[in-house]
Image (spheres, grey):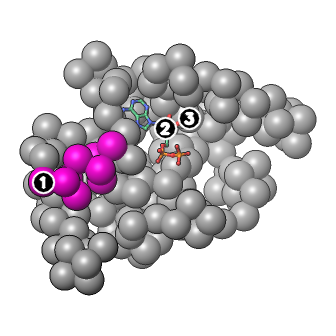
Amino acid sequence: MTKKHVGLYPGTFDPITNGHMDIITRGCRVVDKLVIAVASNDRKGPLFSTEERVEMVLHDTAPLREKGFEIEVRPFKNLLVHFARDVGASVILRGLRAVSDFEYEFQMTGMNARLDSEIETVFLMASEKHQFISSRFVKEIGYLGGDIDSFVSSETKIKLEEKFKLMHQDGL
Ligand code: ADP
């Protein structure tokens, strides 16, 4: 029996965007099983709780699972390379956007390789249409009342609008 290749795609997903979805779709084509690891990342002060982010990732990836791709969505807060071992992943998938991502990703890959030399990091590029999307800007644009339709799913858009409504009510 050939070995099953499990890939781990970690991120904050606050919230999941069409850029993430682009990378997830590509990821499904290069591994047999994809584990999407949603970092609790409390230090980053996410807008959505870990549970909400897991829920949104599950919702948006449902069509891919229906197509037969094996995708698991799991929250995590431990060291990435330890989590990769726990889920049996041999590959970490990351997306690269602009050159600005490179420095951080380069350092993270180097550090992870030192911590566990058997885990490879593979970089994927989103299509031109999705490359510039970032959760941070989606939140800023949405909060200020801009149109975010082409950046997130309609379900995620509703969840964002609910958050912004509460924030505006609280005078934030
Ligand atoms: P982080 O908080 O680590 O930046 P994110 O949730 O923002 O995590 O992103 C997770 C991964 O997805 C990162 O590798 C990031 O570079 C990648 N990514 C996010 N948006 C895009 C995009 N529009 N195109 C390509 N890769 C992306």
Query: Residue drawn 89% across and 35% down?
Result: 114
Front residue (pair 29, 123): 123
Q: Is residue 169 magenta?
A: no
The quarter of the displayed image where residue 101 is located: top right
Q: Residue at x 25, y 54 (%)?
A: 60
**Residue 94 or residue 171, whichever sits in front:** 171
Q: Nearer the viewer, mark 3 or mark 2?
A: 3
- Left/right placement of residue 167 relative to residue 103 reads left
Instruction: State the extent of the magenta-drawn residues as a range.
Output: 137-145
Q: Are marks 1 and 3 in contact (CB under 8 Å)?
A: no
Q: Position of residue 92 (x, y in %)?
A: 62, 37
Q: Which residue is mark 2?
A: 32
The residue that label 3 is drawn on is 93
Pointer 1 residue: 145
Residue sitting at x 51%, y 59% = 38
Which secondary structure, mark 3?
Answer: strand
Distance from disc 2 to disc 1, alpha carbons, whole Å, reads 40 Å
Q: Amino acid at mark 1?
A: Gly
